Image (cartoon, rainbow, N blue to C red):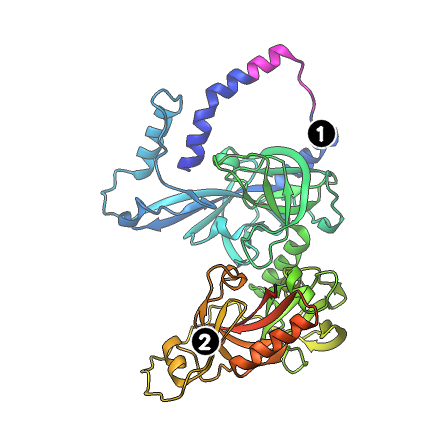
Amino acid sequence: MSDAFQALSRRVLPLAAAVGFALAATPALARGPDGIADVAEKVINAVVNISTSQTVDAKNSDNDRGSDERGNKRGANPQLPPDSPFSEFFDEFFKNRRGGMGNNSPRKVNSLGSGFIIDTDGTVVTNNHVIADADEINVILNDGTKIKAELVGKDKKSDLAVLKFKPPEKKLTAVKFGNSDNLRLGEWVIAIGNPFSLGGTVTAGIVSARNRDINSGPYDNYIQTDAAINRGNSGGPLFNLDGEVIGVNTAIISPSGGSIGIGFAVPSKTVVAVVDQLRQFKEVRRGWLGVRIQQVTDEIAESLNIKPARGALIAGVDDKGPAKPAGIEPGDVVVTFDGKDIKEMKDLPRAVADSPVGKAVDVVIIRKGKEETKKVTLGRLDDGDKPVEASAKTTAPADTEKTVTQKALGLDLAGLTKDLRARYKIKDSVKGVVVTGVDGNSDAAEKRLSAGDVIVEVAQEAVTNAADVKKRIDQLKKDGKKSVLLLMSNGAGEVRFVALALK
């Protein structure tokens, strides 16, 4: 909490003065439609505070006390200005929390977030990071009633969790999900949560953007809003003016720790699918295609005769995955999956993950300029961390084979000899032409090619020696091509496509 409270305390007095001046200078202006108050009154009792506690070792707590939000350290005493009106309060607060324990004693640290009730049986939705690593979870109702909750299930990739608590004698208020696909830019939304531990707080704003990718996970598809969202709002609902939940407030962009009008919510379409599976299976079961993909850049699109640039480029196919028996190959570009257009790379993982395990789907690919349809029966994605096989250490054997080199596109190229395999630790299963040097001023250097990389294909044709590469490149230049598509492999056999300019 230190950063958040520090930022808050630094602004209390100046903000109060600014507000006083504004009130004296101009009449207050209403912000937003009249219906906001009606919606807030209707749904606020369904919004809860989530209180968690975790026991940590004192020796680690000074440097890493955990966090109640993304990057918000909990348990640390905030460094307040000497004249801050909060100084006395915080000194007493943190003194009581520590309870006089010695420096080496394990102790509990607490965090607060938000959530909302979706069923009168006591089912609550929140963010996974709000309850992560918690030893104890409590739900605090709007009237202050505190009830112990149990974790039903959580999903790290969507940052969602479902809790369950035993309802009190009085009837609970539950809220329903709306359809986030129907949201329009500029539409009014309402956020309710527990910012800075202040309890049920209502803020309003508009939908600033949709389908935001903030690089927080493989399925980023956030709603962006300028409704004030601060630390402590995480896990709280984002409502439309019908009182339906259309998002779960999850993250903010802020250099200060407070709201600057850039907040992000997981869209309800994603939330509903994840919550249903967590309630049913206590885990999320996602579809699996068994491919590695890349973005189709303008250069790659030109090399593959795809106009305009679109789709997801297949860079590799898992030997045990569903895509291989369906006939999908590296170099294919997926443009439609189960009837959904794949406009860019990130669209494919979302579409696959949202599909039921075992479903047979049509996958439309572009191969060598022509569209083909493949039928794929999806497998189940293994979300567990797979062990990585350690690289076997090899001793470079004596090698009398002569190394023949060629130069092309700023690359020094050579056939794969035993000596070069040993030097660059290239597996025997990797076939092609090895890069032994890169011109620092070349397009290849800009694309981060380096010595030890292996060219497997040139323009989707396999190459076995440096002369093959030179011949293919010379022919492409004669044909008037502006770029060439290379299938590159590292020593371990992981491949990727790289487009290099021919000029």
User: Outermost residue toward the top?
Assistant: 24
Residue beneath the point at 35% across and 24% down: 88
* Magenta region includes residue 22: yes
Count of numbered circles in the view: 2
Residue 355 visible in the picture = no
Query: Going by the image, does 402 lie left or right of 48?
Result: left
As drawn, 332 above or below 448: below
Quarter the C terminus occupies? bottom right
Foreground pick, 482 / 185: 482
Q: Amino acid at mark 1?
A: Gly
Location of residue 474 (image quadrant)? bottom right
Point out the tag, 1 or 2, that comes first from the N-terminus: 1
Q: Residues within 10 Å of mark 2 (few under 14, many from 20)?
A: few
User: What is the x, y in percent for residue 468?
Assistant: 57, 81
Find disc 1 in the rendering and name its residue. 32
Which amino acid lies under the numbered mark 2 shown in the image of this protein?
Ala
The answer to which of 285 and 360 lies nearer the viewer is 360
Residue 90 pos. (x, y %): 36, 29
Q: CA distance from mark 1 to mark 2?
A: 57 Å
The residue singled out by tag 2 in the image is 492
Does residue 317 appear to the left or right of 301 in the view shown?
A: left
Residue 13 pos. (x, y %): 46, 19
**Residue under the point 53% across and 37% down:** 230
406 versus 27 height, above or below:
below
The answer to whether residue 30 is above or below residue 275 is: above
Residue 79 showing in the rendered view = yes
